[in-house]
Amino acid sequence: MKIVPFLLLAASLQAESLWDYHPIHGGGSAIALGQANVDVRDDRQEGNIVYNKVNAFLYALVPISRTSYFFPRVEWNTFTLNWNKNPKFHETRFNYVQFALTFLSTAIEKWRWIARADYNIDTKHFSQAKTYGLFSALLWGTHEMHRKWHYHVGALGYTGFEGQEVYPVIGFDFSPNKKWMFQIVFPITYSIEYSLTKEWKLSLRGRPLKERFRASEFEPQPGSVFSYSSMGAELNIHYEKFLRLEAELFAGYNFGGAFYIKDRTGSHPLYTDVQSSPYLGATLNYGF
C-alpha cells in the first residue's frame, strides 16, 4: 500500500462524503526474477535458484479524525523459491496470508507518523501459529525541516521462525521542485522520481526483496527455516488517479544476495550467495 497525500484528503473529507474517496481498495502485484547461480559459501557453485511472487490484497480507509486514519488489510501471497540443488527440502511453492493494521497520523505539526503491525501465517498450517507464523512491526516518522526537505526516523523489526531482528529506519527526501523527488530511507525505499504529468511518474528505484519462511514437516530436513534477501535497481513507470487507481510496471536488475537454510530450531545453517539476474514486475491498486 502506498501512502497517499493525506493532507489533501483530510481537507477534502470535510466537505464531501468518504465514499467520494473510494475507501475500499483491492489489487495485486507480481514480480519474477530470472534464474540466478548459487554459490555455497566456502565451497563451490551449486546449481541455480528461481524466485517469483504474486499477491492479492484488500484494504479499507477508516478515518478516526481529520488527521488520523486506520488501514485494516488482508493479503494473500504465493511465492516460488526453487534451488535446484537444495539438499534440505524439495518444496518450492509457499503460500501465506497476511493480516495487517496500519495507523497514519498528521496530527503533530510538521510530522507524519506511520505505525503498522502485521502477522503472516502459512495457509497450510493455521493450527500451528507459533511454528508457522511471523510477526513484524514498523514505526516510521517523517519530519518537515523545510518545504523541500524531510528527514525520516523509526524502527522496523520481525520475530518468528526461530529468529528476530530490529533495524533502524533512517533517511531523507528532497524535492527541489514539483517535478523531482529524491528519497533514501533505509531499509524501506530508495528512489529518484520525475513527474511527467499530474498522473504519470518515471523513476529509478532500488527494490529490496526478503522472504523468511519455514518448509513443511515432510522434507529431508523437516521444518527447515530459510531466508532469502537481495537488492535490485529498476526503471519504474507509475500511473495514479488520486485514490481511484494506481498502476506500475517495472523492469530491473537484481544484484544478488544471500540465501540460508537452518534446521527447525534455527541451528546448523547452510549459507549460500545468490548471484545477479534481471527481473520484471507490475502492481495494480483500484479504489471502489
Image (tube, grey):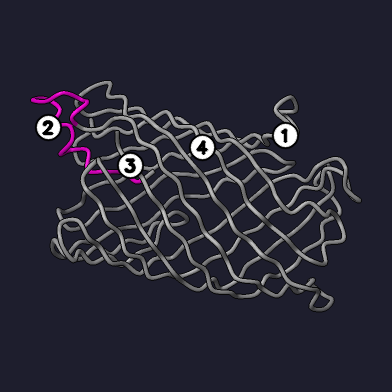
Residue located beneath label 2 in the image: 12
Numbered disc 3: secondary structure: strand
Q: Quadrant of residue 67?
A: top left
User: Which sits earlier in the primary sequence, circle 1 or circle 3?
Assistant: 1
Q: Quadrant of residue 277?
A: bottom right
Question: Outermost residue, bottom direction?
Answer: 44
From the viewer's side, name the closer residue of 225 and 237: 237
Tell me the crowding category of disc 2: few under 14, some 14 to 19, or many 20 or more residues within 10 angstroms, Cα based.
Answer: some
User: Helix, strand or loop at disc 4?
Assistant: strand
Q: Mark 3 or mark 4, which is nearer the start of the sequence? A: 4
Establish if 219 lies above or below 199: above
Judging by the rendered image, the residue that carries numbered circle 3 is: 286
**Residue 17: % across, % down:** 16, 23
Precedes in sequence: disc 2 or disc 4: 2
Disc 4: which residue: 75
Q: Which mark is residue 124?
A: 1
- C-alpha gap between disc 4 and disc 3: 15 Å
- The residues bearing labels 1 and 2 have C-alpha atoms spaced at a distance of 44 Å
Picture coordinates of residue 154 (x, y %)?
42, 44
